[in-house]
Image (cartoon, rainbow, N blue to C red):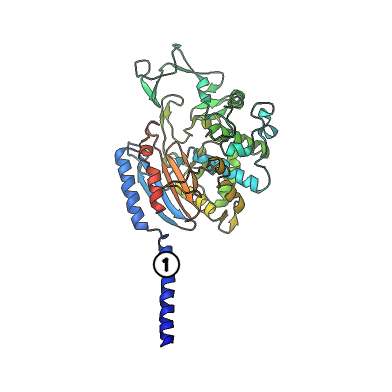
Amino acid sequence: MKKIIFATVFILVLLSITGCSSLKKSSNVFNVKQNEVYIDSIVNNALKEGFFPGAQIIVGSKDSIFILKNYGHHDYSKKATVKSEDVYDLASMSKVLGATLVTMRMVGDGKISLNERLGNVVIEYKNTAIADLTLFELLTHTSGLKPSITFYQSLLSTSDGLPLLTNEKSENYPLPFDNMYVNKNILFDAKYLAFEPKDNYIQIYRNMWLNPEFYQSVYKKISQANTNIRGKYLYSDLNFLLIKQFIESKTNYTLDHLANEIYKELGIKNIGYNPYNWTTFDDIVPTEIDNYFRRDTINGYVHDEAAAIFGGVSGNAGLFANASSVSVICQMLLNNGKHQGKQILKSKIIKEFTSSPLGRKGIYRGLGFDKRKPDNIFTKNQYGHTGFTGTFFFLNPDSKRYLIILTNRVNPIRTNRLMYKDNFSSKIWKQINN
């Protein structure tokens, strides 16, 4: 009788333990159907409300893709539906998927140090006020540099002597740009800009070429962009313009060449700078109708003006990709830097760059990577980045899940911020992590 009682108790205890274990395990199981229904609903509502013309979305894990969906169209003409091969302008996601990935490779290989100072590597800044900024400060946005500089505006003037932009629409200011209106009598600086190819000029748009002498004024403005709050967090595109120079000065290779080496190792082809070099017009999703600088619907050339003046290859922006290519990078990161048995990035480097080294100071930023103050949506270990054009990717190393959302919310104009007011991307991220 005692043996029977003992056996019964043992079985009940065992069932209790395994039951709890199963419950714990099942809570981490991804319900594809439930999440797909939710995503379909929220995206279809976004399309109806005009958040963006179309989107690509992928939800996956370190070794699987759970959901891969394309929605809507390239633009509001609805002539072209979104396909899986289509590439989007990633905007500031380029900071991570381009410049940061290359930096991680270089740090891991011992070719560059996070403590190296700008003036010791990039000769243009050797005797300037920003000479002693470190690569670490640039990556964590603690350099104290101002957020941005509209370099391209110095290439513009007006024939009537009136301002380039004004707040009100009128006969002289008929077309919108951002939340302002553009003078119809704009002139381009003939010293630096040409509208047909010229020797040594850099192509910055379909029909625009820039005299590289212009870069000296760019470097001078960056060197004088210190806000005197070094050590505090201030997000700045200038940091990643400098990281590109850091990388290229250190290696004597261009950023796009170094990034393409990594993409080649990963076997991804629908990602890169200047997409007309590797894909076709029909597979590129347009961004904004630019009535100011490019005077055109931007398609296949980088939307960001700072990246544009560098020929479409910059640390702050410039990458185009489809969600599937970004997905491979996410899986590599979640697999501790491995892809198909090959070590692309060192595991310890991924941990270092995706941590919050300045968290004790209330700065949650990673090295290059965006991280958020923990709340009911984001946890301390999650990381990723967003882009001005309406792009988002985030990874959860605890659940080994990731989310990629690519849209062109700036089409036809950048003032459309409906997806942000609705917390569109955060809602989906929260849903897939429940």
In the depicted structure, whether residue 257 falls above or below residue 66: above
Describe the element under mark 1 as helix, strand or loop: helix
Residue 81: x and y in percent read: 35, 43
Q: Is residue 350 left or right of residue 63?
A: right
Look at 42% across and 59% down and name the residue there: 28
Where is residue 84 drawn, in percent x and y? Answer: 41, 48
Q: Nearer the viewer, residue 198 or 352?
A: 352
Quadrant of the frame with the C terminus: bottom left
In the rendered view, tell whether residue 223 sits above or below residue 96: above
- On the picture, is 117 further left or further right than 295? right
- Give the residue displayed 43% in from the left and 25% down from the top: 295
Q: Position of residue 15 (x, y in %)?
A: 41, 73
Q: Is residue 396 above or below residue 243?
A: below
**Residue at left offset 64%, top offset 29%:** 130
Q: Nearer the viewer, residue 102 or 79?
A: 102
Q: Is residue 118 visible?
A: yes
Towards the viewer: 249 or 382: 382
Report whether 427 appears left or right of 140: left
**Residue under numbered circle 1:** 20
Q: How many marks?
A: 1
**Which amino acid type is marked by label 1?**
Cys
